[in-house]
Amino acid sequence: MKFVPFVLAVALASNASAEVVSRFEVPIASAIINSCNGEVVAVSGASQTIVRSTETRSGNYIFGLHFDVGALRGVGESTGADYRVIDVYNASFQLGLGETFSSQEAFRMIGQGPKAPSFIVNYRIHFTITPNGNFVVYVDDLVARCNGK
């Protein structure tokens, strides 16, 4: 399962030591298979996102990111069971134009009730500054696993 990459409208700092802070919501809609019972769970909502960028003297950028997906909800397509998504992602890294930073992460899908077993989804998240200066985020390699409940 893959998410479509999206371009964040992040203003990059234009001189060394000046920090730029961007705050926005990233809409999310996807489907994930619950590995505990095989049910497709439709997930939707938005991530509350904060991106800090500072240009270094060498022309690279130092980033600090905060994604809070506490507003995401899921619904089991066959049972109608409700799920809450639990995850806050924080990262700091340095990139130059045309470079990518990748990280392995996970979030929890918490089932609400007996028809909704909780499970964990592992994924890779990639951050790239394109040669023309766009900041692109891409998520892939989603793998759900049952957490034994």
Image (cartoon, rainbow, N blue to C red):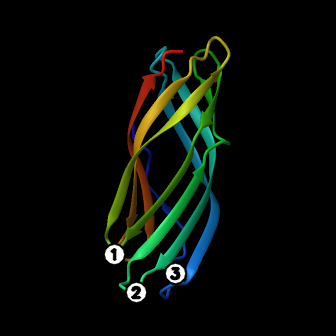
Kindly state the secondary structure of the residue where label 3 is placed.
loop
Q: Are marks 2 and 3 in contact (CB under 8 Å)?
A: no
Residue type of the residue flagged with mark 2: Arg
Q: Is residue 43 above or below residue 93?
A: above
Upstream in sequence: badge 2 or badge 3: 3
Q: Position of residue 52 (x, y in %)?
A: 55, 69
Task: Give the residue displayed 58% in from the left and 35% down from the top.
Answer: 43
Q: CA distance from mark 1 to mark 2?
A: 18 Å
Q: Is residue 111 above or below residue 95?
A: above
Rendered-image quadrant of the N terminus: top left
Near mark 3 (Cα within 10 A), the count class, few <14, some 14-19 or many ≥20, is: some
Task: Pick whichever of labels 1 and 2 is earlier in the sequence.
Answer: 2
Q: Nearer the viewer, mark 1 or mark 2?
A: 2
* Percent coordinates x, y for residue 69 in the rendering: 61, 45
- Residue at the disc numbered 2: 57
* Residue extending furthest toward the left: 98
Tell me, for residue 131, which label it has, or none.
1
Who's the residue at 43% across and 24% down the image?
Answer: 145
| Residue identifier under label 3 | 13
Specify few, some or many for label 2: CA neighbours under 10 Å numbering under 14, 14-19, or 20 or more. few
Circle nearer the viewer, 1 or 3: 3
- Name the mark on residue 32: none
Between tags 2 and 3, which lies in front? 2
Distance from label 1 to label 3 (Cα)?
16 Å
Residue 44 at x, y percent in the picture: 61, 39
Relative depth, front residue between 107 and 72: 107
